[in-house]
């Protein structure tokens, strides 16, 4: 098993942070919810399928 250097751990930490807290995941969902109006649950379901479901199965 290869031991990770501090630089590798730092790079992996930044990559993981960018993956989960990227601008698209912070800005896009509230805008979609605002534009969806009364259909906010359908918009949330669509966002979850495309932003969470598809990356998980690929």
Image (cartoon, rainbow, N blue to C red):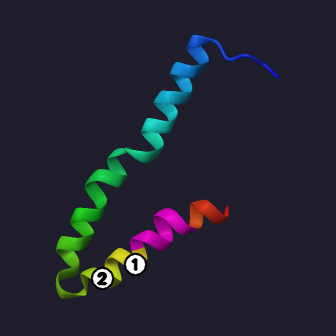
Q: Main secondary structure of the magenta part?
A: helix
**Residue pointed to by mark 2:** 41
Q: Is residue 7 left or right of residue 22?
A: right
Foreground residue among 45 and 28: 45
Q: Is residue 47 left or right of residue 34?
A: right
Rendered view: 39 above or below 47: below
Circle 1 sits in a helix, a strand or a loop, which is it? helix
Foreground residue among 29 and 1: 1
Rendered view: 44 above or below 2: below
Q: Assign the C terminus to one quadrant of the image.
A: bottom right
Q: Is residue 49 magenta?
A: yes
Residue drawn 56% across the image and 28% down it: 12
**Residue pointed to by mark 1:** 45
Toward the bottom, the furthest residue is 38
Circles 2, 1 touching at the beta carbon (< 8 Å): yes
Circle 2 sits in a helix, a strand or a loop, which is it? helix
Number of labels in the image equals 2
How far across and how far down the image is residue 54, in percent? 58, 67
Q: Is residue 15 magenta?
A: no
How far across and how far down the image is residue 36, in percent? 23, 80
- The part of the image, by quadrant, that contains residue 37 is bottom left
Residue drawn 40% across the image and 70% down it: 47
Residue drawn 55% across the image and 68% down it: 53
The crowd level at tag 2 (other Cα within 10 Å; few <14, some 14-19, many 20+) is few
Range of magenta residues: 47-53
């Amino acid at each position: 098993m290869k031991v990770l250097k501090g630089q590798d751990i730092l790079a992996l930490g930044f990559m993981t942070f960018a993956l989960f807290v990227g601008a698209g995941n912070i800005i896009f969902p509230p805008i979609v919810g605002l534009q969806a109006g009364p259909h906010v649950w359908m918009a949330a379901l669509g966002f979850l399928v495309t932003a969470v479901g598809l990356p998980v199965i690929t």
